[in-house]
Image: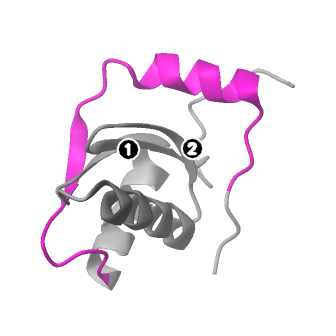
Amino acid sequence: MPSAVQLTSAQTRFLRGQAHDLRAMLQVGGKGITDALVTEVANALEQHELIKVKVAAEDREVRDAMIAELAERAGAALVQRIGHTAVLYKPSKDKRQIVLPRG
């Protein structure tokens, strides 16, 4: 299991700004967090580093749990959650595009 990325509050703020204009790329449906979804999210993170994922669970606690599980299984940091949409970040192994502020 990949270890999740740790972000400082300054880095989180920076990434929230970067994510503002992004559109949700993936949607978590009724099947929940499947291996195929985790793979898709991991691939999207490798390509883009910062992605939005929409989670279609009505219950807030269920939604929060799904988002947490998805971030953990993909080895990503949860930058922000607004309603049904989560912003995930993971630096690309091969082509890093986002330069995080230090501290």
- What residue do we see at 64% from left, 29% from top? 12
Q: How is the image coloured?
A: one colour
The residue segment tinted magenta is: 5-34
Q: Is residue 42 visible?
A: yes
Q: Nearer the viewer, mark 1 or mark 2?
A: 1
Residue 95, disc: 2
Q: Residue furthest right?
A: 103
Q: Which residue is mark 1?
A: 86
The secondary structure type at the circle numbered 1 is strand
Left or right for 97, reference 52:
right
Identify the amino acid type marked 2: Lys
Q: Earlier in the sequence, mark 1 or mark 2?
A: 1
Q: Which quadrant would residue 93 be assigned to in this image?
A: bottom right
- What residue do we see at 60% from left, 39% from top? 96
Left or right for 73, reference 66:
right
Badge 2: few (under 14), some or many (20 or more) residues near its Cα, within 10 Å? few
**Does the magenta segment cover residue 19?**
yes
**Compared to 87, does 67 lie above or below?**
below
